Image (tube, rainbow, N blue to C red):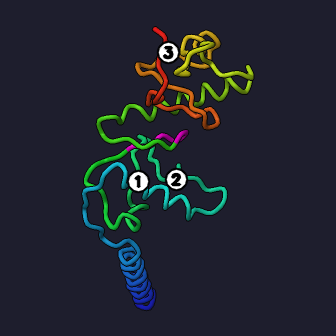
Amino acid sequence: MFNKSLKSSDKKKKEAQINKKNSNSKKDETPEWPVIDVTLDEVVKAVRKFSDKLPKGVYRTILVNDDHSIDFKQLAHTLKGIPSKTFYMSKETYDIFEEMDKDIPPVIDKVQKAVDQFVKEQKKYPMLPYDPLRRVNYYLLMQERYLEQKPDIDLYITDYDGLLSHEKPKGKKAEE
């Protein structure tokens, strides 16, 4: 009986040593990064640099949290720190936004999926003919049940494989 309790306490000591080693090695793996001020442009460059190093089949969406915020723990090595501000990214277009525009990425993602599905089935873009700005026609998407409600911002179909942008195309004027 005495041997059993001795073995049990020895076992607990070994488990404690193993747990201590594991917690120490975890601390060594994730260094403490300083909080830094970065610009939107610096974040964009860091994300591109990070994605250039990703293995084939792995996309930069691994940087995006559920709320569309960017997980800077994965970019800390590239940026040499953790940004003091939160930045957000669209999972569909990879556009990056500052805090004041954090509502845009979820809208872009929802509409981009609707546009992609529309194009797949209808073989054309959901926009009005002759619209020089190439605005997404929300009413057409809603009429065809690809979208439930009209977003509050205009989105534009770019020349890059039908990706959407929230920025009005430069050099084009709407005929109003």
Question: Chief secondary structure of the magenta span?
Answer: loop
Q: Residue type at mark 2?
A: Ile
Q: Is residue 92 above or below residue 71?
A: above
Front in this rendered view, residue 20 or 35: 35
Instruction: Give whichever of 30, 120 is nearer the camera.
Output: 120
16 lies left or right of 145: left
Element marked by disc 3: loop
Image height of 4 relative to 139, above or below: below
Kindly identify which numbered label has been placed on residue 71: 1
Whether label 1 touches label 3, CB < 8 Å:
no
Q: Give the mark nearest the N terminus, 2 or 1.
A: 2
Three-letter code, disc 3: Gln
Which mark is first along the chain, 2 or 3?
2
Q: Residue at x 41, y 88 (%)?
A: 10
Q: Quadrant of the N terminus?
A: bottom left
Residue highlighted by disc 2: 62
Contact between labelled residues 1 and 2, with CB atoms less than 8 Å apart: yes
Q: Which residue is mark 3?
A: 149
